Amino acid sequence: MYSFFNGKIVENNTDSIVIDVGNIGYKIFVPNPFSYQIGETYKVYVYNHIREDEYSLYGFKSIEDRDLFMKLINVKGMGPKVASGMFATGSINGIVDAINKENLLYLTKFPKIGEKLARQIILDLKGKVIAENIEEEDNNLEELISVLENLGYKSAEIKKIIPNIDNSKTLEDQVKEALKLLLK
């Protein structure tokens, strides 16, 4: 199984690139083929998709992108072409954020992803994927939830008010704001 290719881009197509590695051209399906410049050398992380009637390579510029892609294709009803399409129009942080915040509207904007598949993605991956550039403020979220649960509030009540909490505030101020919202 291949992990990555390091070589020169010799061709751009609408959905793929051809990379020359040791005088062998490998066709790799990528989300944004025109972000690769012909004649330039790139390291492309790959996923080998092998089926009875198909052998394809899907490429990514980072290991994090490939790892998220591999988690997405394990979702029931999600194939590699649909998952690759998500990377073409969305960012890794946007996709992860949408999954963790149950943002169906964001997920259904991608081609061939309807509400049913978006719900399945959320069900399978919520809490299991993390963005690489999470701001420190978001780290307070887990602490805030823990504090509120220790005060006796149910997780369903907490989930309803969390989107209304200002993440830029200190944990103490977030707790005060959450309590005001919970007492309404």
Image (cartoon, grey):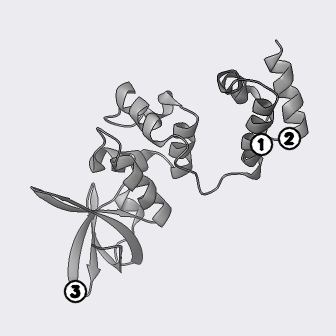
Badge 1 vs badge 2, beta-carbon distance below 8 Å: yes
Q: What distance separates the C-alpha of mark 1 from that of mark 2? A: 8 Å
Q: Earlier in the sequence, mark 3 or mark 1?
A: 3
Residue corresponding to mark 3: 23
Q: Which mark is residue 53?
A: none
Check disc 3 and report its element: helix, strand or loop.
loop
Report whether 117 appears left or right of 134: left
* Residue 62 showing in the rendered view: no
Residue corresponding to mark 1: 143
Residue type at tag 3: Asn
Q: Quadrant of the C terminus?
A: top right
Q: Who's the residue at 74% across and 35% down the image?
A: 145
Residue corresponding to mark 2: 171
Residue type at tag 1: Glu
Query: Which quarter of the figure has residue 179?
Result: top right
Residue type at tag 2: Leu
165 is higher (above) or lower (below) than 181:
below
Q: Earlier in the sequence, mark 1 or mark 2?
A: 1
Q: Quadrant of the N terminus?
A: bottom left
